Image (spheres, rainbow, N blue to C red):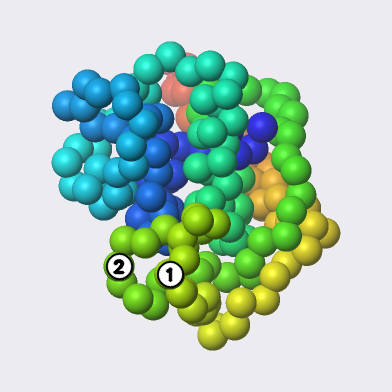
Amino acid sequence: HLNGCIREATLLELAEERGVTLSSHHFATSSTTSTTTTTTTTSSVLNQSHNMYNVAPRSLQDCFQVFDDIGRVVTDLPALRRITEEALYEFAAHHVAYLELRTTPKALLEEQRRRNNGDDNDDNDPNNNSTMTTTTTTGSNRMAGKRRYLETVLEVMREFQRNEQRRYETELESYRSRNNNNNDDDDGG
């Protein structure tokens, strides 16, 4: 699943940018030994250590809770674009030749949300009663529909394919050039 492919560093970075608090039950610094469910501000986790690890084995319910955390940070098309691109490059780095990525199209913001009030309140928490103004880099909070969601994923896939094709052609040409030079050296004997 696409959201499940998110890099842990990306999850933490996006959470920090959006002011989202992740559950320390699932993500904690290597010095954390408690398994109690509490919340930790992402900035404190990032400042303590970049060496993150999964705190405990996960049940199926835990996995769904992690997906909830991911869904609270992947709320806009730039984040969707990023995690899609990173997933493709991760699989390519592991020499995956055929990949099927599942995703559930949903309405997302066109642009990244920015926090205006500067505090650590979780603006995505439905139990949070604080007021929060949603703005974007363009000053609007336009929603992109499911179609735009899919178009974004497909666009990233096409860009990835073009980039990989160019990389392959460049490497092949370099290989042929080296091989031709070696053959020229052998003929001069």
Q: Return the x and y of residue 104 as percentages of the image width and height.
A: 75, 43
Q: Are marks 1 and 2 in contact (CB under 8 Å)?
A: yes
Look at 50% across and 56% down and name the residue there: 127
Q: Residues within 10 Å of mark 2 (few under 14, many from 20)?
A: few
User: What secondary structure is found at the residue carrying circle 1?
Assistant: loop
109 vs 121, left or right, is: right
Instruction: Select label 1 or label 2 by which is in front.
Output: 1
Instruction: Tell me which corner region of the image, top left, top right, bottom left or bottom right, holds residue 152.
Output: bottom right
Question: What residue is disc 2 on?
Answer: 119
Q: Can residue 127 be seen in the rendering of this structure?
A: yes
Q: Return the x and y of residue 89 as percentages of the image width and height.
A: 54, 37
Q: Return the x and y of residue 125 as percentages of the image width and height.
A: 50, 55
Furthest toward the right, the residue is: 147
Kind of residue indicated by mark 2? Asp
Q: Nearer the viewer, residue 8 or 26?
A: 26
Q: Return the x and y of residue 79 as percentages of the image width and height.
A: 55, 55
Q: Nearer the viewer, residue 182 or 89?
A: 89
Question: What residue is disc 1 on?
Answer: 130
On screen, residue 12 above or below 92: below
Look at 74% across and 34% down and name the residue there: 102
Q: Can residue 179 be seen in the rendering of this structure?
A: no
Viewport quadrant of the N terminus = top right
Kind of residue indicated by mark 1? Ser
Look at 50% across and 69% down and name the residue there: 113
Look at 74% across and 53% down and name the residue there: 106
- Could you tell me how far apart the alpha carbons at marks 1 and 2 are, in whole angstroms? 10 Å
